[in-house]
Image: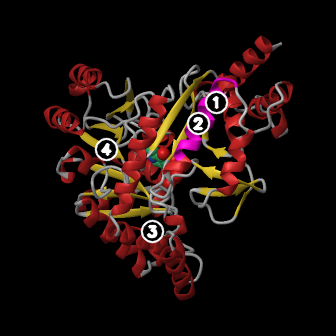
Amino acid sequence: MKYNAYDTVTAVVKSWTSKARSSNIRSTKRNSNFASMPAYKSIRKYEKVGAMLGIKSPFFRAIGGRVGNSCIIDGRKVINFAWCDYLGLNQHPSLAAAAAAATDEYGTCVSASRLVAGETLLHAELEREIASFLGVEEALLFVSGHAANVSTISTVVGDGDLIVHDEFVHNSAVLGARLSGAAVRTFSHNNLEALENILHETRTAYQNVLIIVEGLYSTEGDVPDLSRLIELKQRFGAWLMVDDAHGLGILGATGRGCAEHCGIEPKSVDIWMGTLSKTLASCGGFIAGSRALVDVLRYAAPGFVYSVGLPPAMTAAALAALRVMKAEPERVERLRANGRFFLREAASAGLNTGNSRGLGMLPVIAGDVIATVKLWHKVFDGGINSSLIVYPGVPLKGGRLRFFLTSEHSEDQIRLAIGTTSACLRGGRVPEANRAVASMKG
Ligand SMILES: Cc1ncc(COP(=O)(O)O)c(C=O)c1O
C-alpha cells in the first residue's frame, strides 16, 4: 500500500516536470473540457494519494493578520519561517504609511504602459535609489521579478546566441532562456569547471553568450564564486547575469547583495536582477546595470513595454523599505547572526542542512516526497511554519523543509523550530511545542 502510494506520488510529480509538461499538458482532443487535461488529472490524483496517506494539502492555507516572525494560519498561531521578508519589514510602520500616502496621492494603479502613458515620480525615484544602492548606472522596474527575468533574457539574446546557466536557476530564468530562441546549455550546480568546459567547446559557434547564475540559491542556501565567473566571462567574451532575488538584504555587510559578499566591483556584472517581493516587502522586480542595457529594456522588453507600471503603493513601500535598510544596517547583522545560530544549533541536533552557509535561509533535507510532506505536516502541527520543497523543485530524494530566517526571529523561536523538527524526524510528537509557540512573544 505504502509502496503503491509512493509510486503514484512519484509518477504524478514526475509528470509535472517541464519536459513532460510541454508534451503532456495539452489535451489532444479539440474543444475538450479542461478537466480532461493531464495536468488536471494529476492534481486530482495527488489529492487522492494524500487522502490515502491521511495527509492534508499543505498548499493555499488561509493566513490571518499581518505576517511577521509569527502569524495566524487556519486560525492558529505558528512561528513563521516560510516568508522571504528577510529584514522583517512587512511589520515596519513606515512601509504601510508610505503605501497609504502614495495611494492617496496617485490612486491605486498605473493603468497603462509607462512608456506611452507616463510614470509617477516614485518610479524614477525608486529606480535611481536601487541603482545607486547597488553601485551601477541605472535600474528598471517590472511588475514582478518573474517578468523581469523572462523579459530581459528573451530580449538580450536570441537566435544564434547561447545561454549557459546553472542547473538550479529559478524557473523564470529557465523560461526566459527557452523563449529567447537562443541555444541553451546547463552546468551542474556551482561547478565552474563544467561552465568553463562548455565555454571552451562552444564559444566560437555563437555570436553572444549569456551566463546566468543566482547570487544566493534559494533551494540550497549557497553562493557562486563571482570573482571566477567574472574572470570566465571576460576571458570568453560573454555577458554575466546574476539573479540576486535572495541576495539583497542578506549578502554583504550592508545587504547590498552578492557583489558586496564576494567583494567584486558591481559594474563588472553585466545584468543584475532583483525583486521587490522579498527583503523589500513589496511586489515587483528590477533589472540593474549599464545605461545602455536599461535603455534597451525600456524600449524593447515586452514585459515592460507591453505591461503596466508598478502600482504607486508597491513602489512607495519598496522605496521606504530600501531607506529603512540603509538607515538600520543592524537588521542585516541580526539576520546574519540568526543564520549562524540556526546553522550551529541544527548541526548539534544532527540535521542535514546541505550546502547552506546560514545566509538567510536553511534547508533541512528530509528525503523523498512522502517523507518530506509527512515531516512538514508534523512540524506544522507542532506550531512551526516552514516551506515545503519537493521534486521537481529539487531532486527526487532531496525533499526538504526550507526555513527562511528574518532579522526579527528570536533565538528561542529558532531553538524551538530546530527542536521540533529534529523530534519529528526521530518520529516523536511535539504537542508541547504548540504551547510554547502560543506563549512566545512576537
Ligand atoms: C531566484 C528567484 N528569481 C526570481 C524570482 C521571481 O520573483 P518574484 O516572486 O518577485 O516574481 C524568485 C521568486 O521566488 C526567485 O526566488
| Relative height, residue 120 to residue 33 (above, below) | below
Disc on res. 241: 4
**Mark 3 to mark 4: distance in Å?**
23 Å
The residue positioned 50% from the left and 54% from the top of the image is 410
Q: Secondary structure at mark 4?
A: strand
Q: Are marks 1 and 2 in contact (CB under 8 Å)?
A: yes
- Residue beneath disc 3: 318
Q: Quick one: label 2 or label 3, which is nearer the N terminus? A: 3
Mark 2 sits near ligand 1, with its Cβ under 8 Å away: no
Q: Quadrant of residue 209?
A: top left
Q: Is residue 57 visible?
A: yes
Q: Amino acid at mark 2?
A: Gly
Q: Quick one: label 1 or label 3, which is nearer the N terminus? A: 3
Magenta highlight: main SS? helix
The residue positioned 58% from the left and 76% from the top of the image is 109
Q: Quick check: is 202 in the magenta stretch?
A: no
The residue positioned 53% from the left and 77% from the top of the image is 99
Mark 3 sits near ligand 1, with its Cβ under 8 Å away: no
Q: Are marks 1 and 3 in contact (CB under 8 Å)?
A: no
**Mark 1 to mark 2: distance in Å?**
6 Å
Q: Is residue 31 visible?
A: no
Residue 105 picture location, percent across and down: 52, 88
Residue density around tag 1, few if under 14, some if 14–19, many if 20 or more, within 10 Å: some
Residue density around tag 3, few if under 14, some if 14–19, many if 20 or more, within 10 Å: many
Q: Secondary structure at mark 2?
A: helix
Q: Quadrant of the C terminus?
A: bottom right
- The span shown in magenta is 414-427
Residue closer to the observer: 159 or 85: 85
